[in-house]
Amino acid sequence: MPDPAARDAAEEASALSHPAVDPDSTASYGAHPDQVVDFYAPRGGDRAPLVVVLHGGAWRAPYDRRHITPFVDYLARRGFAVANVEYRRGRDIPGQGGGGPVAGRWPETFDDVAAALDALPGLARTHLPQGDPRRTVLTGHSAGGHLALWAAARHVLPAGARWRLDAPPPLRGVVALAPIAHFERAVELDVCGGAVSQLLGDGADAEARAECADPAVLLPTGIATAVVQGREDTVVPQAVAEAYVDAAAKAGEMVGLTLLDGVGHFPLIDPAADACAVVAEEIAQLAW
């Protein structure tokens, strides 16, 4: 039986071995340096569905949008117009008693994702005219998968929440890749070294914040949703995705779950991996 740690390391090395791909255009949606979107035109040149990508990295500062650009370029080469969103993440300096960068900023991480999605139709008209905002699909990997699910659920946020929308966002659907989609299960499994607990903070604040941030309680959304998950994923285990899908079913909503045998966390965004083609097909099924 292959050593899981060795397999994980090899998969991560493969996914991160591809050179970063520069965008065709970049636009700001705010004043902070991280409040930017990179745009990639469809390589066929025709008008195409708009795929919005939210990168992962446990909401931590060292992991920015550059690591997912080979995947973004892969989608552009498959004929999609792609927007790669950056957002503010945790501090570079570890928290007191912590062993690494803190996961996420409250509320800035969510402020940014909401602002970027709200600004995207207008920005795309200028910077990505080949993209069709009427055929928008959200996708994201890991922590980015969480943010994609959250962004599609803003209309079911608690009344008074700062990011709440009055109506469902105009999306064809969401394809979440190994998402941190169920906070309670993720905390139980200590996903990404306690990233969820760091994102939410401590005490009463954490419970209130979870009500506004946990996709598993923001259900049903009425937005077509698919989850793609590797069975061998030890970074965000299959149990997290299954808990989210179960929560959706209990809320009366069907969420598609594609489980890939022999696949861990990183092949989903690795253009050299067969799993990446599966992801592109899931997106295509919603977009076209």
Image (cartoon, helix red, strand yellow):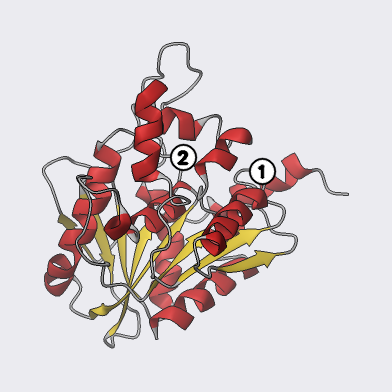
Q: Which amino acid does label 1 sit on?
A: Ala
Residue reaching furthest to the top: 97
Give the structural element (helix, strand or loop) at label 2.
Answer: loop
Q: Which of 16 and 170 is in front in this view?
A: 170
Q: Residue at x 76, y 44 (%)?
A: 4
Residue 245 at x, y percent in the picture: 57, 60
Residue 266 visible in the snapshot: no
Q: Which residue is drawn at 41% across and 19% down?
A: 94
Residue 212 at x, y percent in the picture: 34, 44
Q: Residue at x 46, y 39 (%)?
A: 58
The dot on residue 9 is 1
- 281 sits to left or right of 111: right
Q: Which of 89 and 286 is in front in this view?
A: 286
Residue 149 at x, y percent in the picture: 41, 57
Q: Which amino acid does label 2 sit on?
A: Ala
- 98 sits to left or right of 37: right
Residue 72 at x, y percent in the picture: 40, 64
- 32 sits to left or right of 147: left
Kindly identify which residue carries mark 2: 58
- Comparing marks 1 and 2, which lies closer to the viewer? 2
The dot on residue 246 is none
Q: Which residue is drawn at 45% across and 61% down?
A: 70
- Residue 262 image-quadrant placement: bottom right
Residue 224 visible in the snapshot: yes
First in residue order: circle 1 vs circle 2: 1
